[in-house]
Structures are given as structure tokens and as C-alpha cells.
Image: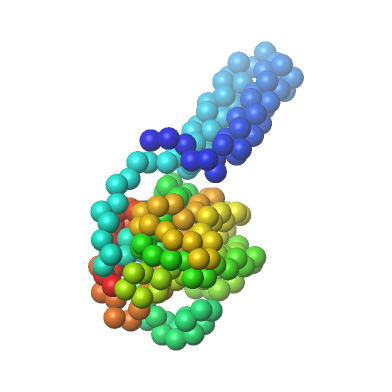
Amino acid sequence: MTIHKEGYQILFWTAFILLAVNVLSVFYLFTGNQTASTLILIVSVVLFFLVLQFFRKPRRTTPLNDKHVISPCDGTVVVIEEVNEPEYFKEARRQVSIFMSPLNVHINFHPITGTVKYVKYYPGKYLVAWHPKSSTENERTSVVIQAKNGAEILLRQIAGALARRIVWYAKEGQPVEQGHELGFIKFGSRVDLFLPLDAEVKVKIGEKTKGGVTVVADL
């Protein structure tokens, strides 16, 4: 397991700030108070490793299958329902939503192999990721991929109350491969999938998913 490139800058500044806090605590704020300085050091180390684990990049092997829709992220399935998707399809779709806690790996993966047909970024609010309106009012990015059989799915990256930056690598017209990186969401968030109504959903509410591995549905 390595560290994702999206974490380099944040980890550098986190380490710099924590080091500065510890230097100030030892030489200025708590001079002669070994207990206070040691406590600050322990808290700093714990905090740094919490941030470090958030940007971990595990090695994953995706079982390629053109019929499978692979989970785009690590997390917990919180929504499976039929909805009207107004942005791109403008018709009924099967929605599967996966909530990503701050402890999950936050890399996003392409769920299918195909061609990117649509990419759109929306600035917005930062409601908690499980709020019903977060899918339409929060900062978000929508990516539509057309599979080899012509079926299209929409993947929506949604920022949460803590997530303040969405990163996406997909571009319109770009060929993509199942299991390859689509992007990254920094700190607590969710991903929505909008599937054809005839897609056979393979997961259940409350089920844990592993990005790039778990089969969410069959097309």
C-alpha cells in the first residue's frame, strides 16, 4: 500500500503545522511542563496518522467483466431505489448510493469499461453526505460512461460536510477501463450510481463495498 498523489500536499502541510505546534509548545507555551509537551506530541502523531491513512492507496485487482458494474468506492450502501434522474437521462433510473466515511479509502474507480460521454462539475453546499438533497445541492461532479453494449450509467461524486474538494480525471470522449482511477474525494462523502432500470442490483442496504472489486450490479 502506498500514499495517493492527492495527499502529498496536505500531508506536507499537516506535518509542517504539527511540527511548528510542537516546537512552540516545548520552547514557548509549556516551557518546563514535560507532561503538556508530551501530550501535544502524542495528539500530533495520532492526528498525522489519521490523515495519512485517509490518503492510503491500496493495491486492488479488478476482475474485469463487461456485464458487471463494479463499486466505484469503498463504503456502505445507503440507498437502492428507483428515481427520476433529471440532469442527464431525464427519465427513471435505478439509484445505488454508497456512503464513504472518513475512515474509508477515498479513491474513486471507473465502474465499467467504456467511453466517457458527459462530465459536469457543480459547485454547491456541504450538507451531510447522507442528506437526501446532497445529491442535487452539494458540490458534485457527474460522469456518464457508455458501456460496450451501449448502456449508459451516471456516476456522481458528492462532497459531504467535511469533504471540500472533489477531484476527477475523466474527460469527455476518453476511453476508460473498469477499475482504473476516476478521481478522489477528500474527507467524508458519497457516490451515487444511476443504472438502467433492467440492471440487476447485487448489493443490499447496509452492505460494505470495496472499490474496484465489489460487484454492484449486472448490466
Q: Which residue occupies the extreme right position in the image?
A: 28
Can residue 165 be spotted in the picture?
A: yes
Q: Which residue occupies the extreme top position in the image?
A: 32
Q: Quadrant of residue 124?
A: bottom right
Question: Which residue is drawn at the image coordinates 29% and 81% (left, top)?
Answer: 198
Q: Is residue 189 above or below residue 148?
A: above
Nearer to me, 109 or 157: 109
Nearer to me, 14 or 145: 145
Can residue 43 be spotted in the picture?
A: no
Q: Quadrant of residue 39?
A: top right
Q: Quadrant of residue 193?
A: bottom left
Give the image location of residue 24, x and y in percent: 71, 22
Is residue 26 left or right of 70 when viewed as pictured?
right
Question: Which residue is drawn at the image coordinates 32% and 45% (left, top)?
Answer: 60
Q: Is residue 30 above or below residue 62?
A: above
Give the image location of residue 81, x and y in percent: 36, 78
Give the image location of residue 191, x and y in percent: 45, 63
Give the image location of residue 31, x and y in percent: 70, 16
Q: Is residue 145 above or below residue 94?
A: above
Q: Quadrant of the N terminus?
A: top left
Q: Which residue occupies the extreme bottom position in the image?
A: 91
